[in-house]
Amino acid sequence: MNSTIITTTIYSYEIANYSIVAPISITLAILALISSILIVVTLVFHRRMHTVSHLLIGNTCVWTIFSCAIQVNNFIYLLFIEWDSSNISCRWRGYFAYMTLSGVTYSYIVQAISRLFFIVLATKYRWIVSFKIHFILIGIQWIVVTVVALPAIVTTDIFFRPLSLCWVPRINMVHVYYSVLAYYCLPTVLIFVIYAYVYRRVRLSSAQVSERTGGRQQQNRDLKIFRNLIVLFTIYLSGGTPATIYIFSGINIIYSFGVIFVPFSIFIEKLGTFFLDRELFNVTKTVIYRKRTRVVSTTTASVLSDKKLSTQKSELFFWSMDVEIIIENDHESLITTTILKSKENKNVEVVPSA
């Protein structure tokens, strides 16, 4: 009698306490998502923000929106759509997760290359700092990111695992090393090499630049933007540190921290974008504080006594007429102007008050 022997291999997967990790990660991802949307809206609807530098910041924010949305989607599948055990579905979720995370990383490479153009090459080649060139850079970056993440979908290294996110498991270490190298290490090295080269060129040419009117100030401004870029990229990069430590240590608690640190670093990086970019910060603050309050259909002369609107020549009487009070608050001058209008659309009194 023939007998069949079935061998089952059971892998030890990284198991995190997702009842705690998932809500924290989702909250941080949503906060980062809202912050990124606010930045993009500010950049699009304010002409002052229509510059090359802010175009690239917007590109990073768009990738951040995609990345946070994918993270929230993956947690929803993990917690609420347990019936979907398809390996192909899991593979696609892993692909989009890796693609969007690397999209944010590679968007910083585009910003670094842009600073190289502005600081080193702009004096010789003015066309290289045009919007057209930067749109081409962004297009190349999107294509590269799409290709770099392809191993997640063309291999079978990502497969459905109960109670686990759709990442490359540690049993496929070749793919894990590729992910760390392609998504973090190479972009990081390239960005810091560009920064070191630009900084060295600036130091060598500082004497020549100081002779040109305004040249030194512009160079300092470009260097400041570059330093802000490095600070923000370092904040974002720190989010992958716990996950990298987990890869080499295999400690599950570090994996839990790694899952949380990814959206946390993205959220902090977005806050840093607001506060380090003073122009963006000032425009956003102006939008928030610029308010126009309208109070409609106020009657009786008690309004006059409350606002102390009186003249020495005559008293103003309002006979059951509707009075519209328009309070205009000019945040820049800190002066409030109160205008009373009657039904006949005639201005009765204009009183500025501090």
Image (cartoon, rainbow, N blue to C red):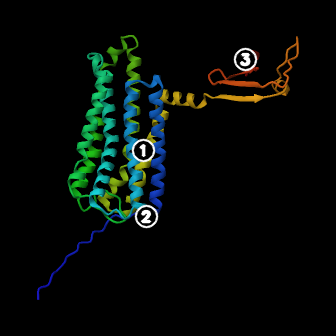
Amino acid type, label 3: Asn
In the depicted view, which residue is nearer to us: 302 or 159? 302
Q: Do the residues labelled 2 and 1 touch (CB within 8 Å)?
A: no
Report whether 156 appears left or right of 79: left
Q: Earlier in the sequence, mark 2 or mark 1?
A: 2
Q: Position of residue 236 (x, y in %)?
A: 39, 43
Judging by the rendered image, the residue that carries numbered circle 2 is: 17
In terms of secondary structure, where does tag 1 sit? helix
Q: Do the residues labelled 2 and 3 touch (CB within 8 Å)?
A: no
Judging by the rendered image, the residue that carries numbered circle 1 is: 266
For discs 3 and 1, the disc positioned in front in the rendered view: 3
Report whether 40 appears left or right of 309: left
Amino acid type, label 2: Asn
Q: Residue furthest left?
A: 1
Note whether 179 is above or below 137 in the view shown.
below
In terms of secondary structure, where does tag 3 sit? loop
Q: Can residue 317 be seen in this view?
A: yes
Q: Which residue is drawn at 53% across and 31% down?
A: 284
Report whether 331 appears left or right of 153: right
Q: Quarter-wise, where is residue 325 in the image?
A: top right
Q: Residue at x 20, y 52 (%)?
A: 154
Judging by the rendered image, the residue that carries numbered circle 3 is: 345
Report whether 284 appears left or right of 86: right
Q: Earlier in the sequence, mark 3 or mark 1?
A: 1
Answer few, some or many: residues within 10 Å of disc 2's Cα (few below 14, many 20 plus, some between 14 and 19). few
Q: Which residue is drawn at 36% across and 40% down?
A: 63
Q: Which residue is drawn at 62% across and 22% down?
A: 332
Q: Give me the disc on residue 16.
A: none
Q: Are marks 3 and 1 in contact (CB under 8 Å)?
A: no
